[in-house]
Amino acid sequence: MAVKRLLTEFGMGSSLRRQDYTQAAERAVKDALWHNSINLAELFGKQKEEMQITVEVGVQQPDALETDRIAAIFPYGQVTVVPRKGGLDVPRDDGGNPTVIANVAISVALDLGESA
């Protein structure tokens, strides 16, 4: 089995007033995905369901992420969401909840067999 990472995409998302880390992460994932139309699985003669997708999410409070909601954005593939400390909380002058910024790195890998 030779699993090879073939693609990495990056995205950024925010939650302006609700301090919703999951919403910011969802927006970051969509930012990364909505700029692409890559038929990666088909290029290698594989099914889309065979794609191994790893979503690394950087936010200041990784334990606050609802990883199932983030994984649900992907219509196919085997999705793993990895919360990490990162991103940014930007304080507000009015004392309200900080603006939350999430960063994501989405990696796609396929098992290319022995020849890879």
Image (spheres, grey):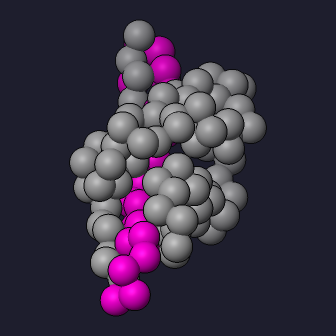
Residue 54 is at least partly visible in this image? no
Towards the viewer: 25 or 10: 25
Q: Is residue 112 magenta?
A: yes
Residue at 57% x, 56% y is: 23
Query: Over which residues does the magenta segment extend?
Result: 93-116
Residue at 47% x, 15% y is: 113
Residue 17 vs 105, above or below: the answer is below
Towards the viewer: 69 or 35: 69
Q: Is residue 106 magenta?
A: yes
Residue 74 position, x and y percent, is 67, 40
Residue at the far bottom: name it. 93
Task: Check the picture and name the quadrant holding the N terminus.
Answer: top left
Residue at the far front: name it. 95
Towards the viewer: 94 or 32: 94
Q: How many marks?
A: 0
On screen, residue 67 versus residue 8, left or right, reads right
User: Residue 90, located in which quarter of the rendered image?
Assistant: bottom left
Residue 110 is at least partly visible in this image? yes
Residue at 34% x, 54% y is: 59
Residue at 40% x, 87% y is: 94
Residue at the far left: name it. 85
Residue 31 vs 116, above or below: the answer is below
Task: Check the picture and name the quadrant holding the C terminus.
Answer: top left
Residue 104 position, x and y percent, is 42, 54
Residue 43 position, x and y percent, is 64, 40
On screen, residue 43 versus residue 21, left or right, reads right
Towards the viewer: 31 or 109: 31
